[in-house]
């Protein structure tokens, strides 16, 4: 819509034919200006208007790293506004006062914000120089851009919020997200790369326990993220920092299928549940052992949502790899997930229902191979992955006498929104890790 609320452009997506098209208003009719075929998801999305009132689109397909393009309403000509040949566009930013496009979040192993509004870019540059070795994000601003709400944090410092006065350069504290951790030692996060078994460079974030100068032969947690088309970032992560604070090296592989590293990298994980994406996670452990960071006899895999699925799949497909397995809200049966949920997201990412393929990639169908003890945690109020996924896994493990513990969290959701369930999760994980790979474990 333009500033008067008139619809001037539209995007059509034919899911069955996988064709995306962009149209602009042409009198009382519509004129096609862009088209992309063979796109499993919509290839375009609107990001707002530029200063000339032209619609801006974010091209997600047809360009590995994405592009922001302007459409000339009179001629239909397309002009690049933001384009990168090496770093993907990960998100867009609009001015809340007028809806105009003013910046992009750029992905890659070290994400950054690029402002197209000169005043905000100058403020960003000033703040970055003022707070070296920290990440400063502009969250919001007054209409004249003189009062700015900013978030400051780092890999070892939880986010805190401030009001920045661009005229006086003064800062006013609003509050910290985790004030009780202000004086607690945290583990540094390192950004690294490793090679997959087929030679692909995989980004990885490694959190070293606090006060460890020589990270060698450490008990290690492989911690794959959820999504799967999501990502980790080299900032403060309360899951990773908690486990690191207990003496564990925490490795977060950005396996193929992760977002933020280009369209080709994300699409390389599509329909690779239990296959290529799983191998990338296993290869992270192999890399850490080769480099000497990890004690191979003291390893555990911990994951939530899709990461929980990866953990359970590791228990069945690679039973000798880990000494313990933790799954929070993990999927144990792919076919059941598709049939019960049935939305296009899962079908696109997992694949169309095929009995043999679903059974191959479903941990619940291969419990006889499991050797490592498993901790299952799941909230009763989870609306993304049904509690039954963990409950049925527990029933299957019980029937064949495999070691496990199921923790049912009453009122717990998929995101651990409530403090009590978050605390319960960490306490259960701490006890489980200590028992199996901690200092008191019997196997070392």
Image: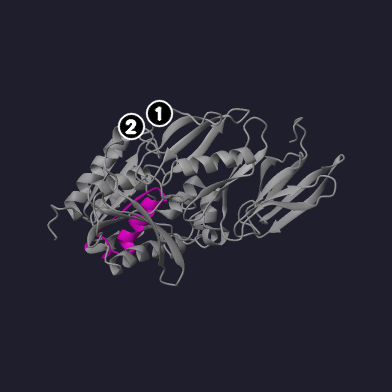
User: Residue 400 placed where, x, y %?
Assistant: 24, 56
Please, what secondary structure does the residue beneath circle 2 have? Answer: helix
Residue 314 located within the stretch drawn in magenta? yes
User: Residue 422 placed where, x, y %?
Assistant: 32, 37
User: Residue 69 placed where, x, y %?
Assistant: 70, 50
Residue 128 located within the stretch drawn in magenta? no
Q: Is residue 149 above or below residue 196?
A: above
Quarter of the image for the N terminus: give it: top right
Total number of numbered discs in the rendering = 2
> What stretch of residues is rendered in magenta?
297-323
Q: Is residue 196 left or right of residue 120?
A: left
Q: Is residue 189 visible?
A: yes
The residue that mark 1 highlights is: 175
Q: Residue lying furthest bottom in this view?
A: 198
User: Residue 335 placed where, x, y %?
Assistant: 45, 54
Tag of residue 179: 2
């Amino acid at each position: 819509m333009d500033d008067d609320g008139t619809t001037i452009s539209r995007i059509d997506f034919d899911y069955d034919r996988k064709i995306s098209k962009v149209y602009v208003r042409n009198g009382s009719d519509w004129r096609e200006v862009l088209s992309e075929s063979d796109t499993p998801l919509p290839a375009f999305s609107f990001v707002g208007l530029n200063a000339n009132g032209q619609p801006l689109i974010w091209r997600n397909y047809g360009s590995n790293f994405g592009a922001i393009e302007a459409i000339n309403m009179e001629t239909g000509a397309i002009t690049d506004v933001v384009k990168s040949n090496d770093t993907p566009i990960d998100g867009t930013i609009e001015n809340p006062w007028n809806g105009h496009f003013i910046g992009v979040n750029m992905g890659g192993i070290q994400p950054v914000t690029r402002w197209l509004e000169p005043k905000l870019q100058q403020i960003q540059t000033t703040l970055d120089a003022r707070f070296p070795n920290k990440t400063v994000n502009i969250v919001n601003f007054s209409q004249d851009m003189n009062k700015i709400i900013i978030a400051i944090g780092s890999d070892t410092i939880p986010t805190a919020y401030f009001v920045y006065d661009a005229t006086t350069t003064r800062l006013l504290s609003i509050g910290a997200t985790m004030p009780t951790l202000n004086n607690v030692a945290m583990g540094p996060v390192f950004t690294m790369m490793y090679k997959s078994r087929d030679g692909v460079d995989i980004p990885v974030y490694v959190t070293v326990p606090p006060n460890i100068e020589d990270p060698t032969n450490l008990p290690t947690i492989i911690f794959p993220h959820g999504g799967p088309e999501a990502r980790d970032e080299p900032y403060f992560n309360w899951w990773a920092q908690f486990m690191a604070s207990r003496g564990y090296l925490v490795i977060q592989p950005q396996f193929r299928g992760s977002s933020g590293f280009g369209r080709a990298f994300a699409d390389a994980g599509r329909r690779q549940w239990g296959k290529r994406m799983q191998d990338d996670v296993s290869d992270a452990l192999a890399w850490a052992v080769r480099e000497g960071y990890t004690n191979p006899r003291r390893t555990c895999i911990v994951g939530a949502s899709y990461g929980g699925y990866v953990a359970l799949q590791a228990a069945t497909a690679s039973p000798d790899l880990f000494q313990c397995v933790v799954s929070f809200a993990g999927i144990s049966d792919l076919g059941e997930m598709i049939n019960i949920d049935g939305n296009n997201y899962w079908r696109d990412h997992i694949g169309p229902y095929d009995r043999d393929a679903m059974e191959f990639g479903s941990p619940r169908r291969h419990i006889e191979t499991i050797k490592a003890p498993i901790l299952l945690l799941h909230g009763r109020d989870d609306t993304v992955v049904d509690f039954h996924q963990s409950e049925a896994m527990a029933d299957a493990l019980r029937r064949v006498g495999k070691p496990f513990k199921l923790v049912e969290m009453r009122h717990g959701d998929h995101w651990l929104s409530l403090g009590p369930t978050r605390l319960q999760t960490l306490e259960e994980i701490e006890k489980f890790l200590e028992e199996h790979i901690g200092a008191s474990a019997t196997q070392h």
